[in-house]
Image (cartoon, grey):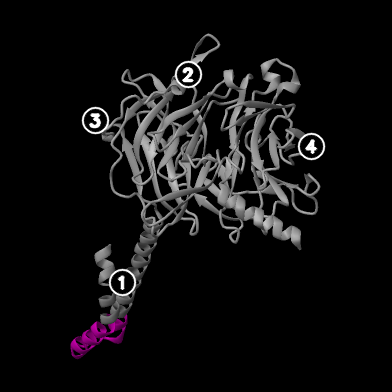
Amino acid sequence: MLQLVNKRSLLRGGALILLALVAVACAPAGVSQKDLDAVKAQLQAKEQEAAAKEQQVNQLQNQVKGLSPSTVIQAGQLQPAAPGAQPTGWNTTESTRGGLQLLATLDSAGPDAFDVKAHPMVYMASEGGTGNDGQTLFAGLQVIDASSKQVIASASYDLGAKISPHTLGVSPDGKWAYLEGVRLLQDGKTVEDITLVINVRTLKLAQILKQESMFQGSKRTQRLHHVISFVDNKGQDRVVLEYGFGSNGGPHFIIDPKDNNRVVKAITVEDTGYWMGHPFLTVDPARKFLYVGLKMAAWADVAKEVAGVAKINLDTYAVTIIPGVGQHLIGMAHSADGKFLYVNDAEESMTVKIETATNKIVGKTSAGVAGPYGLAMNWDETELYTIGKGEGSHNTGSTIGVIDLKTFTPKRGIINPIPLLGHASSIDHGFLHPDPKVNELWVSNQAGTETIVLDLATRKVKTYIDSPHGGNTHSGAFVRYSADWKGEVLADHGGPQPAMYKTRLGIVQAAAAK
């Protein structure tokens, strides 16, 4: 086909010459004009056929250009680390207490998976579920250029079993990604829940972790559900691995990504004093407190007022309980000045406002959607967006509610909730794009096949970013890289990082001064 296209110019440019030669050569032999017209028609038909094939090739080439480089990491390709490369004594007192184990260390060296000079800001998200071919995908991730919105790289991890991972988190320096995974054991029957630690630069697997601990008298393995990262108030890089599904979350682990991802602190029931709920944690803008949702009271057979938020001091690990917040706490979002924390109650489809200085509930309103999940705020903090997943009910939600933060009621005078259309289904997290001039909300899509980009100025979908293999996505992170691969997480499921909070606070203060 490509050879035919290369000859196209000869076909077109030589057609008239050939016709003239045929006419000159054949005219003396009594060739009629009708014969000459027939030859001309045949040549024109060939030329049209060549043009059609060239167009087809161009279309295919454009499709190939649009495809991201995709890597499949299979079990046979997983190379153990070189002798002596794995530090001894990975376990700490806290990893043992919470039951987090290092199962394997692997050689993750290799060529760069994408060009950070061409793509300095990216959005990374998980991918799994059912793919384009109708088959269940292995745990995977995708890297999207935050400006062009093109998928520039992707990888999947074939460890013998398939899954739709519920998370993708990145360390504060952009070096490591953390992904829920599974593997098939050597007996060929047993599937084990694991956590994948991935070298972002190569998208190769670096470590395999597993959580297992005693719970109610027997061993229980929890799956990784969410991941947040932050630099604490002492300048230390931290990642929080959040385990569990439903309303029996935990333990959770604060790890040091610069110390081989070793555990600094486990957060267990013994620490909070109450069962932890759906794994949704966040850190305040000053990086002084970690907020943890507690177990849904109705499922715990305890007094309703107990359901609330555990507020953990990151310097002392002292715990303060903020009670009576709701029945099934999930999404959390902070004001840029840290004065208020907003929390979703998915069971009652409400959103609660907490004053952080007093730890008191100062407002409660309808979320405007059924079963709200994630929470996000706009740049001038006049609107709060509730991600309508349908948590605890239909789980097929595709709309976003808008709360007016001046009145703390669902916003009037607009289409509310906002329909996302497309393949939106069971949407879960919303991420404010780090550039206020862009003014977008990127929405992950647990039962859909795309990442949804909402224009906050028009409240309409700007584009749908197809997952590279047609899989689902859940959670993600915006990351900025310099040319030498020094990275910085700008926002993740726990909310913006301090630089974004500072920008947002400046916008809020400027608006107030007018």
Q: Is residue 490 left or right of residue 393?
A: left
Would you call the spot at circle 1 few (<14 residues within 10 Å), some (14-19), or many (20 or more)?
A: some
Q: Going by the picture, which residue comes out furthest to the top?
A: 217
Circle 3 SS class: loop
For the residues labelled 1 and 3, the Cα–Cα distance comes to 67 Å
Q: Amino acid at mark 2?
A: Arg
Residue 26 % position (x, y): 20, 86
The structure residue drawn at horizontal position 36% and vertical position 52%, both measured from the top left corner, is 114
Q: Is residue 347 magenta?
A: no
Disc with the residue nearer the chain's start (1 vs 4):
1
For the residues labelled 4 and 3, the Cα–Cα distance comes to 56 Å
Mark 1 or 3, closer to the camera:
3
Q: Which residue is mark 4?
A: 362
Q: Which residue is mark 3?
A: 84
Disc with the residue nearer the chain's start (1 vs 3):
1
For the residues labelled 4 and 2, the Cα–Cα distance comes to 37 Å
Q: Is residue 36 magenta?
A: yes
Q: Which residue is mark 2?
A: 97
Circle 2 SS class: helix
Disc with the residue nearer the chain's start (3 vs 2):
3
Name the disc covering residue 46, or none: 1
Circle 1 SS class: helix
The structure residue drawn at horizontal position 71% and vertical position 16%, both measured from the top left corner, is 302
- The range drawn in magenta is 15-37
Q: Amino acid at mark 4?
A: Val
